[in-house]
Amino acid sequence: MSDEARKFLYVNRKAPHGSIYALESLEVVLIGAAFEQDVSLAFLDDGVFQIVKGQDTKGIATKNFSNTYRALGDYDVRKLYVEQESLDERGLTVDDLMELTHDTDDEDDLTSIIVVNRSEMAKIMSEQDVILSF
Amino acid sequence: MSDEARKFLYVNRKAPHGSIYALESLEVVLIGAAFEQDVSLAFLDDGVFQIVKGQDTKGIATKNFSNTYRALGDYDVRKLYVEQESLDERGLTVDDLMELTHDTDDEDDLTSIIVVNRSEMAKIMSEQDVILSF
Amino acid sequence: MSTLHTVNKSPFDGTSLTSCLAHCLPGDAVILIEDGVVAARKGTAAATAIEASLAQCKVYVLGPDAAARGMNGETLATGVETVDYGGFVELAATHDRTQSWL
Amino acid sequence: MSTLHTVNKSPFDGTSLTSCLAHCLPGDAVILIEDGVVAARKGTAAATAIEASLAQCKVYVLGPDAAARGMNGETLATGVETVDYGGFVELAATHDRTQSWL
Amino acid sequence: MKFAIVVNEGPYTHQASDTAYQFTKAALEAGHEIERVFFYHDGVNNATRLTVPPQDERNVQRNWSELGKAHGLDMVVCIAAAQRRGILDENEAKRQGKDADNIAEGFRISGLGQLIDAGIQADRLVTFGD
Amino acid sequence: MKFAIVVNEGPYTHQASDTAYQFTKAALEAGHEIERVFFYHDGVNNATRLTVPPQDERNVQRNWSELGKAHGLDMVVCIAAAQRRGILDENEAKRQGKDADNIAEGFRISGLGQLIDAGIQADRLVTFGD
C-alpha cells in the first residue's frame, strides 16, 4: 500500500485566525508535499474564509499566514476545491478569493482554485484514500 | 461594592460530558456558595441537557457528576432557571429533568427548577451584577 | 467505496451534522459520538433530518455516549442503530475511509 | 441597566449569535469578536438578522478581527459600527455587565 | 473602573487568550485597573514557561508575563484546572511528588474562590473563551 | 487491519482524547493493529507527566501511557504543536535552553511527517478532535 501514491484530502471547514486549524492545515500540506502523494485541498463551510483576499492581521498581532497559500503551487499542490454553496451562504464570490495559481510548461500560470457544487464536493471526498480534517 | 451581596448568574449553554464546562460550572457554584452571594443558575440552549435525568457515564468511563446537582439545595442554591424554548427545541419536557429541590422551614421540600420563557430569561440575565459563562 | 462519517457536536449548537448529511453518499454511514448523540433524540428537528437521510445512508449512535446523556432505546429516533466502541471500530474497518466532521 | 454581549463564533458554524440576539434587550449592545465578525459581512442571512436587531440594540464589530478576515467598511452590513480594542473596553465600561456567548 | 478578566483557553489553539491580552492592555492604557486575571479551564496552559513558539509568531505566554510585570497584575491560575492539565509551581510539584514544575514568571496558583472574589471586587468581569 | 489514530484535543476540556483512547483500546481488543497514535494541536497536552487529576476521576494521561506500554504503541507528539504549548522531552529542553521537561512515559516527539507517514502506512486513519 505504501508504494503507490495515495490520495490525501485536507478538509478545511473553519474560519482562519479564531483558531489555529487553518495555519496547521497549511503546515501539514507543505510538509506532506515532500511525500509525493496525490494531494487535494477542500474549502467548504467557514473554510472558504481562509482564502479570502485582503486579510490583514496586524491589528490582532498574529502571523498573517494567508499569503502562504500562494506558495502551494510551488509545492505542486494544484487542486484547491472550493464549494459554491459555502461561498453563496457567506455572501462571497470567487472574486473575493485570492488568486492561487501554479506554473505550467506552456504559457501562463493556471488557477488552482476549482469551484465545485456540493454534490461534486461529496464525490471528491468519496474518492480519497485519506481524509485529514481541520 | 464588596460589602453587599452581589447577584451572580452562572450561565450553562453546553451539553454535559463532551466538554468539561458543565462540571466546572458546578464546582464554582459549590465553592461560590461560601461567599454568600445571591446565586442563580441559568440552563438554556444545550445547557438543559446537563440536568436531564438518567445520565449514566459508566460506558465512557468518566465521573458521573450529574447527581451533584441534587446537592445544590443543601448549599442554598435554590434558583435554577430553565428555558422553555430550549427544552422544546430538544424534544424535552420538565419531566425529563432531575428533581432538584431544597429544604424549607415548613413541610415538604420545594423544587428549585423554575421554568421560564426566553424573554423572562433575558430579563433575569439583565438583573445580574456578574455573569459567568460556561 | 464508502465512507464512515463521525459527528461529535450537538446539532443545536453547531452545523457540522447538517454539513455532514449534505455530503453523505449512498452506502455511507454516519456515527454520532460525544455531544453529537443528542441529534438522535426523537421528536426534534435534528432527528427528522436524520430520519430523512436514512433512505441513503445508515446512522448509528455510540451507545456509551447516548447513555451518558440520559438517552436510551425509547428516546432514540426511529431507524438509528446503537453500537459500542467495538461496533465503532468495526464500522471504521468495514468502510473505506473515515471522515471526521469536527 | 444594560448589557454588553460578546459573540466570538461564526453564525455559519454555531448558534451563539442567534441565541445572543434572542436574549438582547433594548439598550443592550452586541460586539462581534474573533470568528464572530464574519456575521457582519453584508448580504448574508446573519447580516439580515443583525440588521433586524438594530432596532433594539447596537451592534459593533471589533475592527482588528474584521481586518484579519479580509473585511472592511465596504463589506460591512449597514448600521454595524467598528471599534478597536480601546472601544471594546469603553463599551464594557459603559454597560453594566458583560455576557460572553461562548 | 476595575476589571476582572477570565481566560478560558490556552495559547495558540484559540484566539481567546490573545483577545484577552489585547483587551487587558487596552484597559490599562485607558487608565482602568485590572483587579485580577483568572486563568481557568484550558486557560491555565498560558502559564507554562516551557513554550517555544516559532520565532516569527507572537509569544502568548511571554506577553502575559511581561504585561503582568509591567503593571503588577494579579494573574491567578485555577489550581483544580492546573492539576488536571499539568501546570505546577515548585510547591505543588513537591506536594504532589512530581520531579519538575513549569509555571512561568508572574503567575500564581490559587483556588476557584479567587474567581468569585474577582467577581465581587471588580466593577466588570469579562470572559474570553471558546 | 492497521489503524492510525489522530488526537487533536488535550485531556479533560474535551472528550476527544477519551473517545480516541476507548476506540484504540477496542481496536486492539478486536485484533487490529495500531500503526501510530499522533497527538496534534492541543492533543500534545495529553503527553505531560505533570498532571494530577482528582482521585475520583480517570487519569487521561496515564491511560495513554499504560495502553502504550501494554501494546507497544508508537505514540508521537507533533513537535511544532508541542513547542507552542510547552511539551518538551529532555533533549528538546536542553536544545531550547529550558530548565525542565515534562513529557510522560511512552510518548516521543517528532515531526508532522509522521502524520503523513501514518496516513500512508495505515489502512484507516481516524481523527478525534473538537
Image (tube, coloured by chain):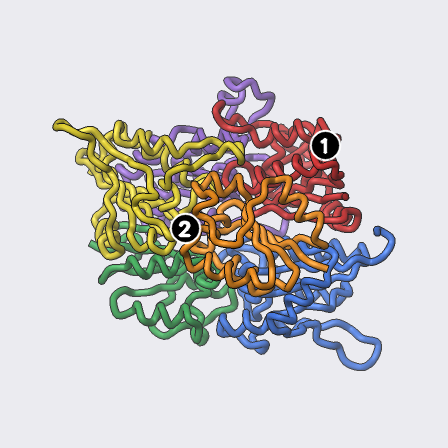
Chain colours: A yellow, B blue, C green, D orange, E red, F purple
The residue positioned 37% from the left and 31% from the top of the image is A67
Q: Marks 2 and 1: CB-CB under 8 Å?
A: no
Pointers 2 and 1 within a single chain: no
Where residue B104 sits, quadrant-wise, is bottom right
Q: SS class of the residue under badge 1?
A: helix
Q: Left or right of B47: which side holds B26?
A: right
The residue positioned 71% from the left and 50% from the top of the image is D94
Residue with the mark numbered 1: E91
Asked if residue E105 is positioned above or below residue D49 in the image, the reply reads above
Label 1 crowd bin: few (<14), some (14–19), many (20+), radius 10 Å: few
Q: Can you give x and y, in whole percent of width and height, for residue C82 in the image?
A: 38, 66
Q: Can you give x and y, in whole percent of width and height, for residue A25 in the image?
A: 37, 38
Asked if residue F12 is positioned above or below residue C74 in the image, the reply reads above
Q: Can you give x and y, in whole percent of width and height, for residue E78 in the image?
A: 68, 43
Circle 2 or circle 1, nearest the eye: 2
Q: Left or right of D99: which side holds C53?
A: left
Q: Amino acid at mark 2?
A: Leu
The answer to whether any part of residue D94 appears in the image is: yes
* Foreground pick, A106 / A41: A106
The answer to whether any part of residue E113 appears in the image is: no
Residue with the mark numbered 2: C102
The image quadrant where one finds the N terminus of chain D is: bottom right
